[in-house]
Amino acid sequence: MSTMTTFFRSGVAAVAIFTAATLQAQAGEEYYFNGIYNPTLADVNKIDLQPQSFDTILPAKDISYNLLNVKGEVPAHVDSIEAARLNIQLAQEKLYKGFAKAGFGLYTTPLFELYYDQTRSKTNGYGLHYRHMSSNGGLKDRGPSDYSFNNIDGYYTAYLRQHTVQGRVGYDRRRVGYYGYPSTDSLENLMRSSPEPPDDARKQVYNAIGFDVRVKSLYKDSTKLAHDVGLKVGNFTNLSRSRELNVVLDAKLSMRQGSETYGGEVLVDNNAYRGVRDSLSDLRQNGTMVGLSPHVSTTDGTYLVRVGAGIFIDAMGKSTFHFYPQAYAQYRLFDDILVPYAGVDGRRMRNNLQSLAKENPFIEGAPVLANSSLMYELYGGLKGSLGSDVGFDVRISKSRTKNLPLFIGRETLYDSVRYGDRFTAVYDRVDRLDIGGELRYSHNEHVNVHGGLHIFSYATETQAEAWNLPIYAISLGAVYDFQDKLLLKLDAQFLGRRKLPVSVPIGWNDLSAAPTVTEAPGLLDLHLGLEYRYTKRFSLFLDCSNLSAAKYERWYNYPVQRTLLIGGATYAF
């Protein structure tokens, strides 16, 4: 037996003796044990309990809803509803291929105009336009003042995937009379008995024929090189047998990189001119003008800054080089309510027989040509809007133009008989200060009003005055559309007094000498138009020009017609 067993048994015996003694002491009895005591421990009955988890989410209980069969009484109340007019429009209104306008007015003035177009197409478009207007003049105290205008042009446009290609061809014929001399019965009798003067002594006819082609990109990606390239060819002649051929190639390029845009303009302008003069040799002036105007601009939507330059080489007569600074800056305030801006500009400008005749149709048959230079134009202003209907632009500018064409009248004599005065072009440096602004109002596409005021100040280098240029100009235009049935148009132009040179004698060639100066008072030219649309296709119109019946002179000795009234109809087909 091991020591551990002996120790365990001795402990048990001691416990037994201690227990028996205790019980004897409690009961008052004594017990004796003899022999060896072997206690036995009973088996323990253990309870086997395993831990279990209890979910804190209580199971959902079935809930039943009971509806009470109760009827609610709602009193009936009818509100009045304002009547509404429905305007049902098709997605695209019907377009008509043709449009004709015809009328007749005072001074035996017929008017006819015709348009014919393809209407809508996704692939191409074409059209034709013709216009005729003529009059017997009706000025009794001047020479024959009859005139006529004829114009016809057609175009074709092809819409490609990323480009549009357009071609146009046209012919224009204008006839005017040199009526700028006082006419009397004795003078008319003298003319009848005198030798017949040349055809261009009493009238002038201008013929212009030409074509142009343009290719324009339609890239959606602004990082690509957008371009607009055109070629224009025109031939211009007059009754004096002067002629010129003008060929112009121009291109506009731009490409955007981030917030910056790089671009420029390219110009190649060639003009071949031959002026036929009666007693002198033919005047020949040929030359090519090449221009390059690069620029770069940056913007963040609030401000815009563009900086560039105009670089020109002009080879008419002798080759000359010209450089002009070009810059522009603006800043948007209060969501485009106010936009202050400032800039400087300059460029070389072509003067040819066609441009001079367009500005003054009573010019001589073979004028001397010289190109103009806008040396600089400094300007600044403020534009913006006063609400959704009103816009304005006020500005001040200071410019200097070298070789600006001015016009001086020259007497025309044949066999000692004075025929219509003709104008010769003189070129001078003109400085101009322009203070003015424009105001526009538009409401609901039925009311459109626009007006402008400009006050001018001039300074010349050689000539005594800036001939025929007004000291102020006021323009006013308004269109009112009454329920798409009655259309009212108003155009008014006020020109301030002008300095006019009295016609110089025949043989006058001293361009630096100062002609006699006369002053033309201010003039008012008021035009009123009425149109009544009987149907969408048929309408009646009445136009009244020079409503004030003022017999003012736009050029010296050349008064305009008094009130000209023309009435007619239009029809779409």
Image (spheres, rainbow, N blue to C red):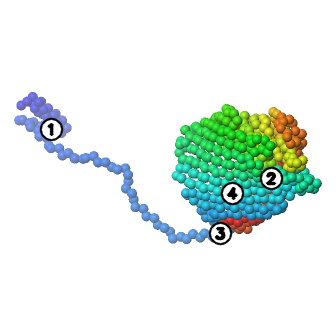
The residue that disc 2 covers is 199
Residue 514 % position (x, y): 87, 36
Residue 356 % position (x, y): 75, 45
Disc 2: CA contacts within 10 A as few (<14), some (14-19) or many (>=20): few
- The picture quadrant where one finds residue 292 is top right
Circles 1 and 4 in contact, beta carbons < 8 Å: no
Residue 513 % position (x, y): 86, 35
Looking at the image, is mark 1 or mark 3 earlier in the sequence?
1
Looking at the image, is mark 3 or mark 2 earlier in the sequence?
3
The amino acid marked with disc number 2 is: Asp
Disc 4: CA contacts within 10 A as few (<14), some (14-19) or many (>=20): some
Disc 4 versus disc 2: distance between alpha carbons?
25 Å
The residue that disc 1 covers is 29
The residue that disc 3 covers is 77
The amino acid marked with disc number 4 is: Ile
The residue that disc 4 covers is 152
The amino acid marked with disc number 1 is: Glu
Measuring 76% from the left and 37% from the top, which residue is drawn there? Answer: 403
Viewer-nearest of discs 4 and 3: 4
Circles 3 and 2 in contact, beta carbons < 8 Å: no
Viewer-nearest of discs 1 and 3: 3
Circle 4: element type: strand
Residue that extends furthest to the right in the rendered view of this protein: 186
